[in-house]
Image (spheres, rainbow, N blue to C red):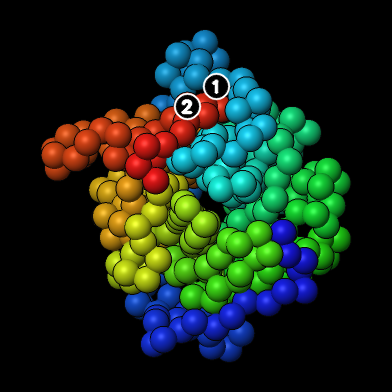
């Protein structure tokens, strides 16, 4: 992969851009996470319908964790995109000769401290030391469940500067402070042509950012398009539904595979603007012209939303049936499960 000194090329063509004013970003559609303290406290203190079982045995039946067989990643598939769901928004993706990782979090908690904060109820199916050789990492934004400090350090200790990180504006400095220098930082619609022949495109998302009490929205959020010689991959990151997805589809679709968030969406009055539910996820799938999609951002962490812990999976299946869509068009997988998408229809 290219070294971090490489820059992104502007490719705006009148495409919608994030608003940047007084040192802060905001969504150009006038929606976002502008919630006051009382609204946030009401959400955190409100009743949850998640009902995650305390029994590991029951969880093993409803959300089994498979031990990955990484021998499959020894060679890139001749056709199609290979995908392994680590959990939440973390996926291992292989196609056209590269392996990439999305929003890696292998820690027990999504928090600045591993002593407090939302904890996993489904552990990662593997450790970072067990992963195959990775070429690049895609980061969508700086929330703790998408940019995990311990995972970043562990990946850097293992791969060093051979691993290229793609991040939205404002995060490169944080990465540098962690000792990571092979970083490509882009704003929406900027393209980076890697030496490997791949094109990485930073594309819009509807979300927000923060890691401390005084840095809200000082860094950007995004989704990512990865265009290879024969196949393509779209990573939606963390987002609400917005008009940009049709634009992404027009400029960069169709995609062989997309990973799209379908969980952490209730109550809609609080999370609807920044988290897609299964219904919105299907809209994204159609807008970006994805040939096949995998639902992510569900079934992993306690206390990040109020819906029943299995509802994202079950609701997605029901909606596909109601809309007359093939069950294979938009699937969910088990933690640690490897699937090959588009093998005969790249």
Q: Dot 1, how many residues are within 10 Å of its Cα: few (below 14), some (14-19), or many (20+)?
A: many
User: N-terminal of the two: label 2 or label 1?
Assistant: 1
Q: Nearer the viewer, residue 187 or 291?
A: 291
Residue 244 in sight in this render: no
Disc 2 from disc 1: Cα separation: 6 Å
Residue 122 tag number? none
Residue pictured at 77% horizontal, 66% vertical: 3
Whether residue 227 is visible here, answered yes or no, is yes
Q: Are marks 2 and 1 in contact (CB under 8 Å)?
A: yes
Say which quarter of the image contains residue 91: top right
Which residue position holds label 2? 334
Image coords of residue 35 (percent x, y): 44, 66
Q: Position of residue 234 (x, y in %)?
A: 46, 55
Q: Secondary structure at mark 2?
A: loop
Q: Nearer the viewer, residue 173 or 303?
A: 173
Q: Which mark is residue 65?
A: 1
């Amino acid at each position: 992969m290219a070294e971090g000194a490489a820059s992104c090329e502007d490719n705006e063509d009148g495409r919608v851009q994030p608003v940047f004013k007084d040192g802060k970003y905001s969504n150009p559609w006038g929606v976002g996470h502008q919630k006051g303290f009382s609204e946030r406290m009401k959400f955190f203190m409100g009743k949850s319908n998640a009902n995650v079982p305390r029994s590991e045995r029951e969880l093993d039946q409803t959300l089994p964790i498979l031990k990955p067989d990484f021998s499959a990643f020894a060679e890139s598939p001749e056709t199609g995109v290979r995908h392994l769901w680590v959990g939440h928004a973390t996926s291992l993706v292989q196609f056209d000769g590269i392996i990439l990782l999305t929003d890696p979090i292998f820690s027990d908690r999504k928090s600045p401290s591993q002593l407090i904060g939302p904890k996993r109820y489904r552990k990662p199916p593997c450790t970072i030391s067990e992963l195959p050789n990775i070429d690049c990492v895609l980061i969508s934004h700086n929330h703790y469940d998408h940019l995990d400090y311990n995972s970043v350090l562990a990946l850097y200790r293992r791969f060093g500067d051979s691993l290229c990180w793609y991040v939205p504006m404002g995060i490169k400095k944080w990465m540098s402070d962690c000792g990571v220098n092979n970083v490509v930082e882009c704003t929406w619609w900027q393209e980076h042509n890697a030496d490997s022949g791949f094109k990485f495109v930073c594309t819009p998302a509807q979300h927000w950012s923060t890691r401390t009490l005084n840095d809200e929205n000082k860094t950007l959020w995004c989704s990512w398009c990865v265009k290879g010689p024969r196949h393509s991959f779209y990573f939606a990151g963390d987002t609400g539904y917005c008009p940009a997805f049709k634009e992404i589809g027009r400029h960069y679709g169709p995609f062989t595979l997309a990973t799209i968030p379908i969980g952490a969406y209730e109550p809609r009055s609080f999370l609807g603007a920044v988290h897609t539910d299964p219904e919105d996820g299907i809209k994204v799938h159609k807008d970006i012209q994805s040939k096949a999609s995998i639902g992510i951002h569900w079934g992993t962490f306690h206390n990040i939303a109020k819906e029943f812990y299995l509802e994202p999976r079950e609701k997605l299946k029901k909606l596909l049936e109601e809309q007359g869509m093939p069950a294979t068009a938009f699937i969910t997988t088990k933690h640690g499960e490897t699937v090959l998408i588009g093998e005969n229809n790249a």
